[in-house]
Amino acid sequence: MKSCVIVFPGSNCDRDLATALALVTGTPPLMVWHGDTDLPDVDLIGVPGGFSYGDYLRCGAMAARSPIMRSLIDAAERGVHVIGICNGFQVLTEIGLLSGALMRNQNLSFIGKSIDLSIETCQSPFTSAYSEGSTVSFPIAHHDGNYFADEETLDRLEGDGLVAFRYIANPNGSQRDIAGILNPERTVLGLMPHPERVVDPILGKPDGRALFDSLIGALS
Amino acid sequence: MTAAIDETSLADAAEHGLTDDEYALILTILNRPPNRTELGIYSVMWSEHCSYKSSRRWLKTLPTEAPWVIQGPGENAGVVDIGDGLAAVFKMESHNHPSFIEPYQGAATGVGGILRDVFTMGARPIANLNALRFGAPDHPKTRHLVAGVVAGIGGYGNCVGVPTVGGETNFHSAYNGNILVNAMTVGLAKADRIFYSAAAGVGNPVVYVGSKTGRDGIHGATMASAEFSEGSEEKRPTVQVGDPFTEKLLIEACMELMATDAIIAIQDMGAAGLTSSSVEMADKGGCGIELDLDLVPCRETAMTAYEIMLSESQERMLMVLRPGREEIARAIFEKWELDFAVIGRVTDTGHLVLRKDGTVVADLRVAPLVDQAPNYDRPWVKTPEAPEAGANDFPLPDSPENVLKKLLASPDLASKAWIHDQYDSQVMADTVAGPGLAEGGDAAVVRIHGTGRALAMTTDCTPRYCKADPERGGAQAVAEAWRNLIAAGARPLAITDNMNFGNPEKLPIMGQFVGAIEGMRNACEALDFPVVSGNVSLYNETDGEAILPTPAIGGVGVIDDLHRHMTPRLKQSGETLILIGKTRGHVGCSIYLQQLFDLEHHRPPPIELAAERRAGDLVRWLIGRGLVSAVHDLSDGGLYVTLAEMALAGGIGADLEVPADTPIQAWLFGEDQGRYLISTGEPEAALQRAAAMSVPCQLVGRTGGDALTLNGANAISLVELREAHESFLPDLMARTH
């Protein structure tokens, strides 16, 4: 599986995602600067967490207008897999690859802690190595993770099985406890929690490992 | 010469916080009156904050050397060798006054400033810690200040992407009018790629990078060097405004440039901004610097030389580059969308010469700004000896389990999850033990990226001890930092100190300072734990009321095998609990007396440094051999609180033995120093080793169940203890009146 990670000014989980990908695939991903216009030929594009452009204006809004995004959208439309974590999820909603938006947490505070999630579907290249309905623990670290979409969109997401992860105890006010969603083709995943931080067992229970194992299974 | 343009007077000097004598000395040095810009430069360079004029002679008495120390105090941060060609770079610094005036920005820029001190040295910051002291929980300003400071620390650290992994938070009415925000950063560098601030090479370009200069923060250093009074909020314009996004770009751009050979010297613009950075670089290099202030990137129009030199706008750095490397550097900073400007040259004149609009607006010899800064031998009186409290004098006013519950819910011991849940403690994916993780501990543990080793780090101080007995308090702060690193399985290396005190012109306050230094020196020497960096914050008084003397200590150690790091969490039922170290039953100045009897004036426990070291060496040995499954040092609250913290972390109960020959309150809640509680499945091996190392040791209980009991009775469930422990801070912050 060949992968790359996009780096925006203010990205700060780019190294974490690269480290996790290198650990699981044995090959470090290519790091792609936001100002570039061409993407390398890869199977997976990672849009990392952090504070692209300081989260100024609106989380992910400025990154969504970076030069690289045209190529990223083209690649996604060709079926290249994309994962957006935290700020990356916000960016993917801003460019319209995923539905809905991430609003400020209901308690108006940044929340940084480990949290339990249920695996809502295993029918995706990102989650096939999990067992459906099982509980995993990933860290969250965000100020704007309160997932919002209109009722019709939410019904469609649920009806089509596109909700990938749900909070067991909703920390941020997200509609229907949604923590992560897929696009209709199931080739794009966005999620607020950080699976890439829980891949190495020395850092805690490695619940994030199966996400990357799923991708290797699907894309190698 | 332009000195006559706007000649200054004694009255101007007083307005700048300079004394009559100090102004007279400036006249002697210059042989003329300084102009307003020059006076501004002198006033900040000679401020308490920049010159350490009340503390310098005492700081010099602290031990600063060890074979592993690469750089001690005097640079932007301390540097210690951690093996494998790597170095840990760290420092703690206060941002007290700004945080009281404007808590969010004050705390945020405190974090930003200390990060810059560390990455200026060529180190990538890998962790932040914060030592916070707030006023009484029920003081009308406390909740506002807690909320603002915590949001500010999180707002900056989370965005920059450096994990906030530890620290401490105390509440005490002595901080009602003057909170303490001490921020510490730990960074990692190659031991042979440390960057320093000494300018060199006549004609070499002096380069300004980072944010533009605005009118914010002018006179911040001077403000930090004076007492507060009612109406201090009016000083809000002297508080800087932080931009963590720019800081993140600045870190990445500096790291990229530091990988080339372009940099000769680099210095961040912290307190006193362009003034202190240019003066320090010239002074350390024994050279001169000429700056053309028209070339300084400014955020606002028509800024004067005075404003440009005294601005404390954040996220700026000054560098001296190798000739011909300007374009390499410019390309990197432009890539990161940061300002880059060649604003001057290194000279051999020994002068700082500033030009604006084509004329010289200041011309000062550099050396006297530093060398002739006042160095006061302030008079002081020794703190009177506090009365001893007898072990039998204060019997339990309630059942032991109820007292335990009360202590666990008390402000200093209650869970601080409300605070650290607002911090990203795991970004960079190397945090092994930290407050937001299942594996919290006495010290945070952060992996050295890409290796099987880790750094352990902690901040410690018990201010009520320091008030009652500054010498014991100073020694205890150092010893507790050392103990916390030991308990995490680390080899303690060195400390940074953040000395927060009241007005040094008052004899008893200066006496507290001298006493604390004395205690710290003894502990540092006995434990081979030198001071490598630090910061002094004086005049922490409001309307004449001083804070508790607070020498906050930041300690760093190294763990050579990450799989051998240790935490307090009880992991196994049916294990034996062993208390390491001597218990005499010292209740004086304990949290028990503070919370149950409203007393904290008694003498704090003695620090027996030789015994401290032996106990620590034993614990390290036990951890290194894998003979223990949990370790926690004993501090505030004593044995029973320590056990409760271990039990709550692991969700496993325990039974504690209560000996017949010690008063129960002294056994459970006494705060004798140099002690650890360990949980082990191999008690015989542990006891044997303890005997061989002459460390007092006793079996005190067994793990198991879901409650704490004493000799099998007085059961209190972990559920009930957890509720008490975890509700204090959320309840306080949710109050609406």
Image (tube, rainbow, N blue to C red):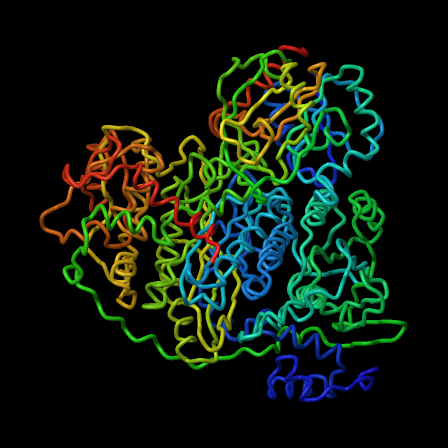
Give the image location of residue B188, x and y in percent: 58, 44
In the displayed structure, would residue B456 be above or below residue B451? below
Residue lying at 47% horizontally and 50% vertically, measured from the top left: B734
* Quadrant holding the N terminus of chain B: bottom right
Residue B686 coordinates in the image, percent (x, y): 23, 35
> For this rendering, which residue is in front, B446 or A38?
A38
Residue at screen point 63% across, 27% down: A191
Left of B204 or right of it: where is B555? left
| Above/below status of A135 relative to B670 | above
Residue B443 at x, y = what percent? 42, 44
Give the image quarter of residue B308.
Answer: bottom right
Could you tell me if residue B494 is visible in this image? Answer: no
In this rendered view, identify the residue nearer to me: B8 or A68.
Answer: A68
Residue at left 65%, top 79%?
B16
In the rendered image, the residue lying farthest to the right is B358
Number of numbered callouts drawn? 0
Q: Is residue A173 above or below residue B270?
A: above
Q: Is residue B167 left or right of residue A103?
A: left
The residue lying furthest to the front in this view is A151
Evaluate whether residue B168 shows in this view: yes
Q: From the viewer's perspective, is residue A190 above or below residue A78?
A: below
Furthest-left residue in this view: B660
Give percent across and percent down for residue B78: 55, 54
Q: Quadrant of residue B369?
A: bottom right
Q: Is residue A33 left or right of residue A85?
A: right
